[in-house]
Image: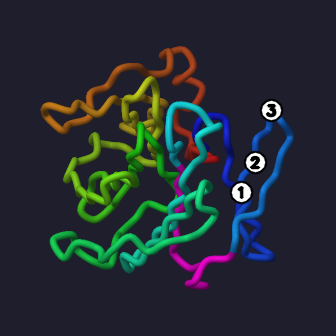
Amino acid sequence: SAGGLVCLLDLSHRNFYICNPLTQSLKEIPPRSVQAWSRVSVGMVLNGRTSNEGCKVMWLRNDGNHEVYDSVQNMWSQPGAFPPSIKLPLALNFRSQPVAVGSTLYFMCSEPEGVLSYDVSTGIWIHFIIPLPLHLTDHTLAEFQGKIMLVGLLCKNAATCVCIWELQKMTLLWKEVDRMPNIWCLEFYGKHMRMTLP
């Protein structure tokens, strides 16, 4: 999702749709030129500050193939080759949906641990090698007021807690900014917990 718009994928018909829940509108996106669906991550950014200016949808496969749909031009394009400096195949964390900040999409990687970014307006890829916090199990990226956040389960000595970290731009490290109250964590003590990601 981005700016109130939601990108939907119909797995049975393999089509993309852009939905605006407020106006109850639904638009089908033209078919892509490459029909491949395994190991795919999809993200969306706005062209400007509001959804009225349109959006871009990006489709990224773990082999580096990618396409971008522009709602203004109503077409898909292949914006150039994947940079050879980033190791392929990508070890994307497909349980973590990409998040958008401005014109940049952020994807969670698992090997090496970190975040892969793609600026839709400039076409620049960057792979940030960022180790995950210790004892972290299930986790996903999130965005809050233009900041990249990490939400996950911290499991240590049979104790489990939901924690939130913020990516520090200067150090490129995760800094814990909040965690579930201890009284709630006690309810998880000794239990095998999983976090269901949207």
Question: Is 24 drawn above or below residue 66 in the view shown?
Answer: above
CB atoms of marks 2 and 1 within 8 Å: yes
> Which residue matches tag 3?
22
Q: Nearer the viewer, mark 3 or mark 1?
A: 3
User: Residue visible at 22% across and 72% down?
Assistant: 83
> Which residue matches tag 2?
19
Q: Please indicate, yes or no, whether residue 158 appears anywhere in the rendered image.
A: no
Question: Is 101 drawn above or below residue 185 in the view shown?
Answer: below
Decide: few, some or many residues near mark 1? Use Cα within 10 Å; few <14, some 14-19, many ≥20. some
Identify the secondary structure beneath mark 2: strand
Q: Is residue 195 left or right of residue 65?
A: right
Q: Quadrant of the N terminus?
A: top right
Relative image position of residue 181 (x, y in whole percent): 50, 15
Relative depth, front residue between 150 and 169: 169
User: Residue visible at 53% across and 23% down?
Assistant: 186
> Which residue matches tag 1?
8
Q: Nearer the viewer, mark 2 or mark 1?
A: 2
Q: Please indicate, yes or no, whether residue 92 appears anywhere in the rendered image.
A: yes
Magenta span of residues: 31-44
Relative depth, front residue between 124 and 8: 124
The number of discs equals 3
Q: Residue furthest front?
A: 73
Label 3, label 2: how far apart the Cα atoms are = 9 Å
Relative image position of residue 7 (x, y in whole percent): 67, 53
Q: Is residue 183 left or right of residue 137?
A: right
Given the image, on which type of amino acid does mark 3 rest?
Answer: Leu
Given the image, on which type of amino acid does mark 1 rest?
Answer: Leu
Magenta span includes 69: no
Relative image position of residue 77 (x, y in whole percent): 49, 72
**Which one is earlier in the sequence, the residue at label 3 or at label 1?**
1
